Amino acid sequence: MKLKIAILAGDGIGPEVTREAVNILNVVAEASGHEFTFTESLIGGVAITANGTPLPQSTIDTCLDSDAVLLGAVGDNKFNSLTPDKRPEAGLLQIRQELGGFANLRPCLAFEALSENSPLRPEVTKGVDILFVRELLGGLYFGQPREWNKQTGEAFNTMRYSKSEVERVAHIAFQLAQKRRKKLTQVDKANVLECSQLWRATVDEIKTQYPDVTVEHQLVDSMAIHLMNTPRNFDVVLTENLFGDILSDESGVISGSLGMLPSATIGGKVNLFEPVHGSAPDIAGQGKANPLGAILTAAMVLRHSAHLEQEAKAVEAAVTKVLAEGHRTSDIARGNTAANVTTQQMGKLVHNALAESIDRQQSLHAV
Ligand code: IPM
Ligand code: MN
């Protein structure tokens, strides 16, 4: 199989974590005889500096001509004074629109080896396996009109959803729930917002097509606390764009670090893969960044775009093994040992663990 992957490393720690993710994809390609090709393009602050725009047309063209897009992170404090439409983040929002993926899958796992890293007690986080399905192309992020009127001193944004936008992402969430523990929690603010009432009514209408899936509704404020108190109660969590952004960051508390969380966006022309964390300019270029979020994102490329489920699992197992051996970047050092590896060393450890497991598999097959 041939897979063309566009690499948009972006800003801050984006390039250093993406490099480790690409190394992992290369191991899989070599071992399995598949051909992965990588084309690097600019996005975010580095694109503004080079081209005066956060998303050059050439980047869009490269991405649309690819089978998958792997993105690092965007955001640079240098551009904080710019209006939202000119900032590095605008490039990210625009590429999401261009690619058309509306279902952003954000898994949250409690890694056994990191159980002491979470401020939550191990018995609370043990075994947590949540899949957030965040609607990615609607809501406050894109709704018109929007404005900050400096004359009147007023600013407004628009939360807008159509029934069909809710339906398409809800179907994906239900289908994913069917393959998991068959529970879907839909999160909204239906006691205040009409948009949320639309979400609730639409999900209730669709659920008759998925009789094997149990549906519950949660208000986003109480969901924020349930997620910390009883995270094991959740399987698939479906929600709109902004609530999904906030809740998925919150779920980093369960995993032990935001640096551990991957994501995949499906449903559009080309799937988009990005770790949940940001560009972390404060630690960029120092070898302190945790590449595991990006590496687990590479596993999602294998799962959702290359359809190599076994290989995706092998990458995830390699990450689990390296963590179990006690290797820690600084973000996951708390409560355990001090950080003992750099970004690159962590990447290399996963690389070696993966290569070993592939060798073992191949020699088993050879017998
Ligand atoms: C994320 C990020 C982005 C978002 C920002 C950088 C625009 O926080 O991917 O979660 O809000 O979607
Ligand atoms: Mn976010």
Image: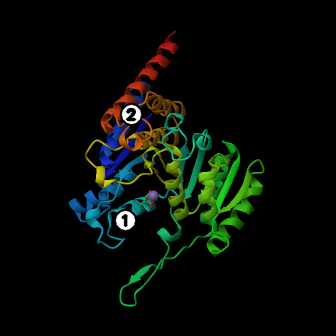
Residue 146 to residue 183: above or below: below
**Considering depth in this image, is 117 or 12 the residue closer to the camera?**
117
Residue at the image position 53 percent from the left and 63 percent from the top = 241
**Considering depth in this image, is 229 or 271 the residue closer to the camera?**
229
Q: Position of residue 18 (x, y in %)?
A: 35, 43
Residue 154 to residue 290: above or below: below
Tell me whether circle 1 and circle 2 mark residues in contact (CB < 8 Å).
no
What residue did someone put label 2 on?
24
Residue 18 marker: none
**Residue 227 in view (yes/no):** yes
Q: Earlier in the sequence, mark 1 or mark 2?
A: 2
Residue 90 marker: 1
Residue 322 shown left or right of residue 230 in the figure: left
The kind of secondary structure element at disc 2 is helix
Residue at the image position 73 percent from the left and 55 percent from the top = 215
Q: Position of residue 34 (x, y in %)?
A: 42, 30
Quarter where residue 97 is shown: bottom left
Kind of residue at disc 2? Ile
Residue 314 to residue 177: above or below: above
Q: Quadrant of ligand 2?
A: bottom left
